[in-house]
């Protein structure tokens, strides 16, 4: 899985290190991911307080590729096993701790995933502008079982140009990777795509395990790209504009 | 005729003109296509003869109920019947109400135009899947503590500190350019703006059901287009929902502004952060739905209290070790079931009210279900009781309230009335419900 390595990288597989436990324990409750309301956030003890950085991420992709399922998977939520179109916008909040390689600084990423069903987008004009408002990243989805969803990326990605949306991090995820019997997108196509667009392509699929292993690569990659983008935006000074300290409730 | 598994209801939806199946829900084992075809056929045959077929009963106690909405969609409910303990009249009311609720769900999500002007059946089939979550909720009836589908009253939770929350909801709605705001705690309405209560009672119930399904998904916020089946069946409003804490959701119904992003980043934190502790104490009321300050006699098993003016209800089951000592076989779910059955029993036989029995105003095919002897009297019964092996039940109504109370069988029958009137006055004086 070749990735474009941005500077300011985070420790990969940090969730496996013992030192990360005190941070990951804040997002896990009884072996399940904790669900935070909008008025809540993970709270570290005062001596270990870390900054929380907020990001808005739009999930883009053809109907049926698994946008809602991916959002639920990343947040550790249950999702319905029968597909139906998401009506309107649904947002999901994911908290994810990560540690910078260069200076050992730990950050809590608050990633708010914005998911909107295709037919609702077409039917109601107000939804897309609302999704685009102050968005920081786009997660492009295609399904390994549906070639048209992969081809459709070529139409989707140019719509999110830097000029009209400012600085945007972009990550591509191929879903339903486990259904290799029905695989419709060849490995070499994915490699070629990656070379052409210079975007990270990740894979998702299979049974949901209770561990963090299957979501960590995607969340780390998102975090890295968002952080990198902020660094670029802020020039040399690594300072996030929206940075805010953890609110104690 | 053994058509279905024990106790379940199957729902069929077809196009009224051509009988094309749109979806089926319920029962794990679907009815064979030939049976679905016959059910549609017999209704159509009746129509040809100038007969409106609305209900029929099978030899085995099963029931089939038909209803056509706006000449475009036909809904059929098939129940195995019998097992739930209700008699056939009650079952029919239940099914009629179910069909009406299902139709309203479909309108809520898709809008009436989409359903009435059938252009593309395949697309409609696909779009209808968005309603399944809501429809399944109606069919399962497993949700403990939610009776609104049956009573058409809003399931409520009485918070220990309503004034603070009321101010917050009013303020939040206003800041979001809306007059309709509502706070849900554990899927029940804790407080709402005055205008929210002026929505049609069925809409309030339906929106509550929608918020419960949205909330169950665990998402943080939503911008959901809704069509109000009575107030605005063809023009969508926006339902903005925010999960403040797990189990506590605030909603507003609004127009084009504010955007979800703006409402969330500028209004939610600012207006609700100071109330986190208040919200937590509200969450701790939990399933009881009544604040701890309201005493309930230990021999009360379950209660449903309806305010007939505001169309709100509170209900709870209290099942402690004390109850289990007297009958270890009692379970929470059985108590909820018994409460529902007693409600249907009382409403269909004694407390008949046009407000709650307007099952099918559209085609006016509704017969009376009241006990025959009532027709000879000029007055309405105000109280009733029922003694069974599992529990003793008492129902009473006043101009403002209706109370349905389930008690342990050990309570002497002559004391039921006193317990019921006492419970009613205790709750009202403590909460001003």
Image (spheres, rainbow, N blue to C red):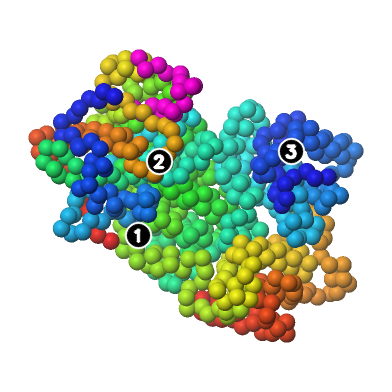
Pinpoint residue B363: horizontal percent, then vertical percent.
78, 48
Magenta span = A172-188
Do residues under tags 3 and 1 come within 8 Å of each other at their CB atoms? no
Tell me where residue B35 sits by quadrant.
top right
- What residue is pinned by disc 3? B31
CA gap, disc 3 to disc 2?
Answer: 36 Å
Mark 1 packing: few (<14 Cα in 10 Å), some, or many (20+)?
some
Q: Which residue is mark 2?
A: A209
Label 1 SS:
helix
Q: Is residue A60 left or right of residue A124?
A: left
Q: Residue at x 19, y 29 (%)?
A: A6
- The local secondary structure at tag 2 comes to loop
Q: Is residue B138 above or below residue A62?
A: below
Question: Which type of secondary structure does the marked residue at label 3 adopt?
Answer: loop
Q: Is residue B189 left or right of residue A108?
A: right
Left or right of A207? Residue B144 is right
Q: Are marks 3 and 2 in contact (CB under 8 Å)?
A: no
Question: Of discs 1 and 2, which sits in the foreground?
Answer: 2
In the rendering, at what x and y percent does residue B379 appear?
81, 75
């Amino acid at each position: 899985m070749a990735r474009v390595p941005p500077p300011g990288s985070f420790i990969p597989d940090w969730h496996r290190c013992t030192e990360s436990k005190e941070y990951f324990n804040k997002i896990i409750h009884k072996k399940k991911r904790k669900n935070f309301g909008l008025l809540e956030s993970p709270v570290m003890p005062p001596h270990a307080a870390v900054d929380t950085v907020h990001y808005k991420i739009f999930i883009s992709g053809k109907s049926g590729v698994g946008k809602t399922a991916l959002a639920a998977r990343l947040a550790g939520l249950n999702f319905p096993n029968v597909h139906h179109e998401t009506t309107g916008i649904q947002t999901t909040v994911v908290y994810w701790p990560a540690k910078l390689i260069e200076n050992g600084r730990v950050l809590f990423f608050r990633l708010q995933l914005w998911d909107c069903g295709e037919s609702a987008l077409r039917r109601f004009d107000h939804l897309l502008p609302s999704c685009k408002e102050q968005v920081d990243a786009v997660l492009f989805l295609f399904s390994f079982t549906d070639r048209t969803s992969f081809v459709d990326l070529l139409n989707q990605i140019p719509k999110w140009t830097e000029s009209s949306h400012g600085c945007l991090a972009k990550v591509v995820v191929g879903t339903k990777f486990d259904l290799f019997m029905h695989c419709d997108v060849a490995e070499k196509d994915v490699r070629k795509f990656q070379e052409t667009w210079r975007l990270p392509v990740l894979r998702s699929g299979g049974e949901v395990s209770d561990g963090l292993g299957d979501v960590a690569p995607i969340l780390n990659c998102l975090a890295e790209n968002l952080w990198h983008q902020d660094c670029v935006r802020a020039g040399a000074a690594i300072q996030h504009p929206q940075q805010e300290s953890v609110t104690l409730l | 005729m053994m058509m279905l598994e024990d106790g379940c209801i199957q729902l069929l939806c077809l196009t009224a003109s051509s009988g094309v199946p749109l979806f089926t829900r319920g029962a794990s084992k679907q009815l064979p296509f030939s049976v679905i075809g016959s059910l549609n056929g017999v209704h159509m045959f009746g129509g040809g003869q100038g007969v409106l077929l609305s209900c029929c009963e099978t030899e085995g106690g099963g029931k089939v109920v038909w209803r056509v909405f706006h000449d475009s969609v036909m809904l059929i409910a098939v129940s195995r019947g019998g097992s739930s303990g209700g008699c056939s009249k009650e079952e029919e009311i239940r099914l009629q109400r179910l069909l009406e609720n299902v139709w309203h769900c479909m309108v809520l999500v898709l809008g009436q135009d989409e359903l009435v002007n059938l252009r593309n059946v395949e697309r409609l089939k696909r779009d209808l899947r968005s309603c399944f979550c809501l429809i399944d909720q109606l069919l399962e009836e497993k949700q403990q503590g939610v009776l609104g589908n049956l009573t058409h009253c809003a399931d409520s939770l009485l918070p220990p500190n309503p004034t603070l929350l009321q101010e917050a909801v009013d303020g939040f709605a206003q800041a979001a350019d809306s007059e309709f705001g509502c706070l849900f705690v554990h899927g029940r309405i804790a407080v709402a703006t005055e205008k929210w209560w002026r929505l049609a009672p069925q809409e309030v119930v339906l929106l509550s059901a929608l918020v419960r399904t949205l909330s169950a998904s665990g998402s943080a916020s939503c911008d959901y287009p809704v069509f109000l089946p009575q107030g605005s069946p063809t023009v969508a409003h926006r339902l903005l929902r925010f999960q403040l804490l797990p189990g506590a959701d605030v909603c507003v119904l609004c127009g084009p502004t504010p955007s979800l992003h703006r409402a969330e980043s500028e209004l939610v934190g600012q207006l609700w952060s100071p109330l986190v502790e208040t919200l937590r104490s509200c969450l701790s009321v939990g399933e009881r739905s009544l604040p701890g300050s309201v005493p309930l006699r230990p021999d009360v098993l379950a209660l449903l209290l309806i305010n007939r003016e505001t169309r709100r209800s509170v209900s709870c089951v209290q099942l402690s070790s004390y109850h289990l000592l007297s009958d270890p076989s009692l379970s929470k779910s059985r108590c909820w079931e018994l409460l529902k059955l007693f409600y249907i029993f009382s409403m269909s036989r004694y407390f008949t009210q046009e407000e709650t029995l307007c099952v099918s105003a559209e085609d006016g095919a509704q017969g009376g279900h009241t006990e025959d002897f009532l027709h000879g009297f000029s007055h309405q019964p105000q109280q009733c009781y029922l003694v069974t092996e599992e529990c003793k039940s008492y129902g009473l109504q006043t101009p403002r309230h209706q109370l349905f109370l389930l008690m342990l069988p050990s309570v002497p029958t002559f004391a039921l009335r006193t317990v019921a009137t006492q419970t009613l006055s205790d709750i009202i004086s403590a909460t001003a419900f």
